[in-house]
Image (cartoon, rainbow, N blue to C red):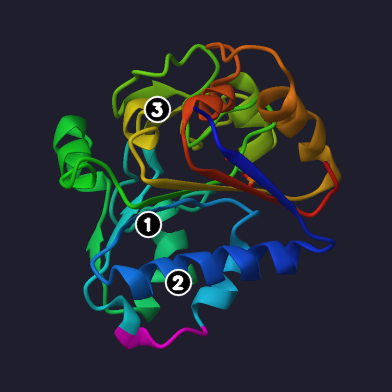
Amino acid sequence: MSLISFNPFSHADDVGKEAARLILEGLEQKPSSTIVFPTGKTPIPMYAALRQSEPSRWTHARLFHLDEYYPAPKPGAPIPYETFETYLRRELWDHVPANQYWMEPYFNHPAKYDELVCAESGPDWVILGIGGNGHIAFNEPGSPPDSDTRIIPLSPQTQQDNFGGVHLPGYPTHAMTLGLASILKAKRILLMATGDKKRSIVERALLSSEPPHIDLPASWLKTHPHVTILTDFPL
Ligand code: PGA
């Protein structure tokens, strides 16, 4: 049975603080937690709050990323976008002494990354944003709930949202993403959505009575028993 709880706040900073509080509470209960972290604009306040935590809390944690642009840029070559490794290092991973699992070394072996994430029958936490088209991680529309961790083409809308255009020279057209199957194996899922433009997709994917379907990947969260949605708008 689905047990989605909706927690609306009035400010994006409060969404980030609450996400950080829940993650740190989880780490206190289980110091060796496996946590899968997102990138994007939405989680920035969460990372600011997590950086205030005592680094020793993180010693036994296992950190993974949700997705990464593919292919990797050539070492040293200038690129017009930021890899998710660079983002995650800056926002959290370089600040905490956790066990860290980068995605790029697994580009040719996505199933191995999946095995590491799901080593204990599924991650303890998957932290998510939501795309304007309802994607979670880079599980774009068309992704079934049993989709594997894989390399996937970015939809035109995602390329537009992330880079300001479609097939722009120097920008990636693909990414590796944790599959919906592994996301749905998480013991807890936390989804943050901030900014009024996310409201309609959250309502459509998670609040409506429409059954989950592949054109709206976030709607599969309705099949998960423990999802917490944090927003800065009322629902
Ligand atoms: P955003 O991205 O946080 O930058 O809005 C979310 C997503 O595409 O999953």
Mark 2: secondary structure: helix
Query: Dominant secondary structure of the magenta stretch?
Result: loop
Q: CA distance from mark 2 to mark 3?
A: 25 Å
Task: Give the amino acid type for the residue marked by disc 3 in the picture.
Answer: Leu
Mark 1: secondary structure: helix
Q: Position of residue 93 (x, y in %)?
A: 37, 70
Residue at 45%, 71% in the rendered image = 25
Residue at 47%, 60% in the rendered image = 87
Q: Is residue 54 magenta?
A: yes
Residue position for label 2: 25
Is residue 50 found left or right of 152 in the rendered image?
right
Residue position for label 1: 85
Q: Which residues are magenta?
A: 52-56
Q: CA distance from mark 1 to mark 2?
A: 25 Å
Q: Position of residue 37 (x, y in %)?
A: 43, 54
Q: Please count the marks in the image.
A: 3
Residue 57 in sight from this viewpoint = yes
Picture quadrant of ligand 1: top right
Task: Give the amino acid type for the residue marked by disc 2 in the picture.
Answer: Glu
Give the mark nearest the N terminus, 2 or 3: 2
